[in-house]
Amino acid sequence: MSETKTSKKGVFSWMLFDWAAQPFHTLVITFIFAPYFVSKVVPNPGVEGDFASDTIMEGVQRVPDAVYGQQLWGQALGIGGIFIALMAPFLGAMADATGPRKPWIAVFSLAAIAGSALLWLATPDGNAPVTLILLAFVLALVGIEFSTVFTNSMMPSLVPRSELGKLSGSGWALGYVGGIVALIVVLGFMVADPVTSKTLLGFTPAFGLDATQYEGERATGPLTALWYLIFVIPLFLLTPDTPKSPDQKNAVKSALKNLWATIRELPARKSYLSFLVTSMLYRDGLNGLFMFGGIYAAGVLAMSTTQLGIFGILAALAGAIGAFFGGRLDARFGPRAVVFWSCWLLFIAGTIIVSSTPESILFIVPVTSGSTPLIVFYIAGSLIGAAGGALQAASRTLLVDQVEEKEATEAFGLYALTGRATSFIAPLSIAAVTAATQSQRIGITPILVLIALGAIGLYWVKEKK
């Protein structure tokens, strides 16, 4: 572990990667684009015609199919997750064998930028190239996730072990603030109510965006691409990279050899193996909450894009606070305790959300006010944001505790593998349960089981003092 410090500019530039990448998760996956895609873009496969119009064609009204849209979105997430799971450990081992991380970050950053920009094509007119849009989303998802693997692996070389918790927490907090700023920009100046054609702040949409064609929602893709491009540049310019390995020619052979040796040793490294399995469960549950929370709110609670955006701002603000103070708690009590209690807070908040409908809360409490479920959802979402921010920040530190610095990228590759090993199962199971029950509410319940199992599994995970 490094006992020297990188310059403040270098460390802050590394932290800016979280700022650069977070809008993809906030705008595209969770709060704006995904709910829009599911509710406005994907047609009912059993009905022909233009579903965006209110006209009756052949006696049937053409409407978006949220259930079918959730199925497709879950399948896209699953496919992306499978690819990440298969490739992340090998690419991580390759990076450790060759040395520098920045060339890998550059390649996958281009994929993230291109895929995000193409989301503009998701028109609500019934003629959108749904397959192309889903492929673009998978490309962007893979690009963001792999860029994150290589950027995370730079962390142990930047500061001493005693400061890792604060660094990780501050990075996540900065990322959440970036998500908040991006949401405010989108809601305040781009996304407008189709009826009033005004944004949340009462403005006409910027750049002449047409509210009736949902161009504000569609523009989140290109905005995410531009945002990422601008704010990832300091990482390349100011953050020091790992030196090149002298044995570049045998990099592939060395990577495969080292990866295989690590996999064979895992049963003997019980804490490391336990962490990989445990984090696989609770991270998949957390990702499920993030990926389908907005879709659930739009489909079950009928929340508008503006309401979802407000929810997103509250959750992201809570996430920034949770990550910042979680990093401090990590430094004081260790990352394991932070992860454990964050999991149970997520379980409680997820249960509240799944049990909330316009008619009842916690399955049995009747609703007397139309705004009550919305307020409850906002509170639960803020709790998820705070616990999720602390959980993700502390998890990076807890992983570093399991390995030596020379194994960092390979470790984060395995971390991505285990995180994705069930991440493709969860979305696909959500898609399957949703299709079987025709209920968005029942479809996301497996998330809670994953989070609880993850918390229990931490019993076998150790940390460095």
Image (cartoon, rainbow, N blue to C red):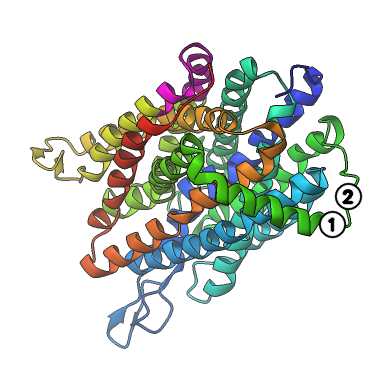
Measure the C-alpha gap from mark 2 to mark 1. 6 Å
**Name of the residue lying farthest toward the top:** 332
In x, y percent, where is residue 371?
Answer: 24, 36
Question: Of helix, strand and loop, which mostly describes the magenta segment?
Answer: helix
- The residue at the point 38 percent across, 45 percent down is 285
Circles 2, 1 touching at the beta carbon (< 8 Å): yes
Q: Determine whether 26 is above or below 117 in the image.
A: above
- In this figure, which residue is indicated by the disc labeled 2? 247
* Residue 360 appears left or right of 324: left
Residue 181 shows in the view: yes
- The residue at the point 66 percent across, 48 percent down is 223
**Type of amino acid at the residue the image marks with label 1:** Asn
- In this figure, which residue is indicated by the disc labeled 1? 250
* Residue 195 appears left or right of 436: right
Neighbor class of circle 2 (other Cα within 10 Å; few <14, some 14-19, many 20+) is: few
> Which quadrant is home to the N terminus?
top right
- Specify the segment rendered in magenta: 321-339
Is residue 380 covered in magenta?
A: no
In x, y percent, where is residue 268?
Answer: 50, 41
